[in-house]
Image (spheres, grey):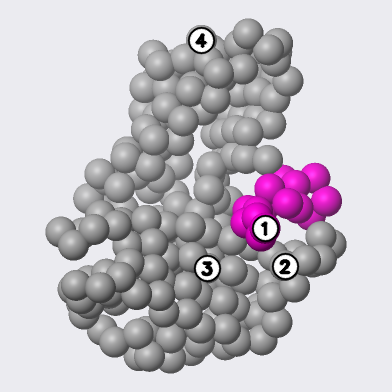
């Protein structure tokens, strides 16, 4: 039997890192995971609600917990002058987060991502936007290749599953460019699974990227 393994979990510690970094007793493990999700959800909602801040995308939020300190690192693709606007709002974020969790000391850092189309979550969200506009699969692939041309990507694979373009029958569309060595643990492979609900059912987009 063939078993599907998440490429990120398969490569953890070797060339992939955890987004939550802390050590805790077994009883408090679930509470801390729930706490991290609250922080991430709030930051995502807060930044998207700000009307004058135009964010390309929040890539991921890394949370490091120490004895009396919590360090939150936000990785985003954004214009330089907009970073200053977000930094002004960090105090508001701190106050809101303090109400949700037990930590009192915070250190929030923003790191800018330059090549946004090197990340599978951005590509998957781009594909979703195109599908909503009813753009054909081949045109989506062509545009995706154009966006990743000036990056360090050695290989990319895209798979779309579900009732695509409002068809009654479920279908699988996929595309591969370059190499994706999924069996090699040392290979740097990024993966993203994105699901959206439509009136016809659930549509899933899988993106693999190899560097």
Q: x and y percent of residue 173 in the render?
A: 41, 79
Instruction: Work out whether mark 4 precedes mark 1 in sequence or the reverse, and give the earlier one.
Output: 1
Q: Nearer the viewer, mark 1 or mark 2?
A: 1
Q: x and y percent of residue 198 in the render?
A: 21, 59
Q: Are marks 4 and 3 in contact (CB under 8 Å)?
A: no
Q: Label 4's element? A: loop
Instruction: Work out whether mark 3 precedes mark 1 in sequence or the reverse, and give the earlier one.
Output: 1
The stretch of residues the image draws in magenta is 1-17
Which residue does the numbered mark 4 point to in the structure image? 102
Q: Is residue 108 visible?
A: yes
Q: Nearer the viewer, mark 4 or mark 1?
A: 1
Q: Identify the image quadrant of residue 50.
A: top left
Q: x and y percent of residue 25 in the render?
A: 70, 11
Going 35% across and 85% down the picture, which residue do you hit?
Answer: 137
Instruction: Work out whether mark 1 precedes mark 2 in sequence or the reverse, and give the earlier one.
Output: 1
Image disc number at residue 182 = 2
Instruction: Work out whether mark 4 precedes mark 3 in sequence or the reverse, and give the earlier one.
Output: 4
Going 60% across and 87% down the picture, which residue do you hit?
Answer: 177
Image disc number at residue 207 = 3
Circle 4: is it few (<14), some (14-19), or many (20+) Cα within 10 Å?
Answer: few
Q: Nearer the viewer, residue 60 or 197?
A: 197
SS assignment for the magenta stretch, majority: loop
Going 70% across and 82% down the picture, which residue do you hit?
Answer: 179
Q: Nearer the viewer, residue 66 or 18?
A: 18
Image disc number at residue 1 = 1
């Amino acid at each position: 039997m063939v078993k599907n393994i998440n490429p990120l979990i398969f490569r953890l510690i070797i060339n992939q890192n955890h987004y939550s970094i802390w050590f805790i007793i077994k009883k408090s493990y679930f509470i801390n995971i729930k706490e991290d999700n609250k922080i991430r959800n709030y930051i995502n909602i807060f930044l998207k609600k700000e009307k004058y801040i135009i964010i390309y995308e929040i890539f991921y939020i890394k949370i490091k917990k120490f004895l009396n300190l919590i360090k939150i690192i936000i990785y985003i693709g954004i214009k330089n002058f907009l970073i200053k606007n977000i930094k002004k709002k960090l105090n508001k974020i701190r106050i809101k987060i303090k109400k949700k969790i037990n930590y009192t000391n915070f250190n929030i850092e923003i790191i800018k991502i330059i090549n946004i189309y090197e990340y599978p979550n951005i590509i998957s969200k781009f594909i979703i936007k195109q599908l909503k506009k009813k753009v054909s699969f081949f045109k989506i692939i062509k545009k995706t290749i154009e966006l990743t041309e000036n990056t360090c990507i050695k290989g990319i694979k895209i798979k779309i599953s579900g009732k695509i373009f409002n068809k009654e029958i479920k279908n699988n569309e996929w595309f591969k460019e370059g190499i994706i060595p999924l069996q090699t643990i040392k290979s740097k492979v990024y993966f993203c699974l994105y699901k959206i609900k439509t009136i016809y059912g659930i549509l899933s987009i899988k993106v693999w990227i190899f560097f």
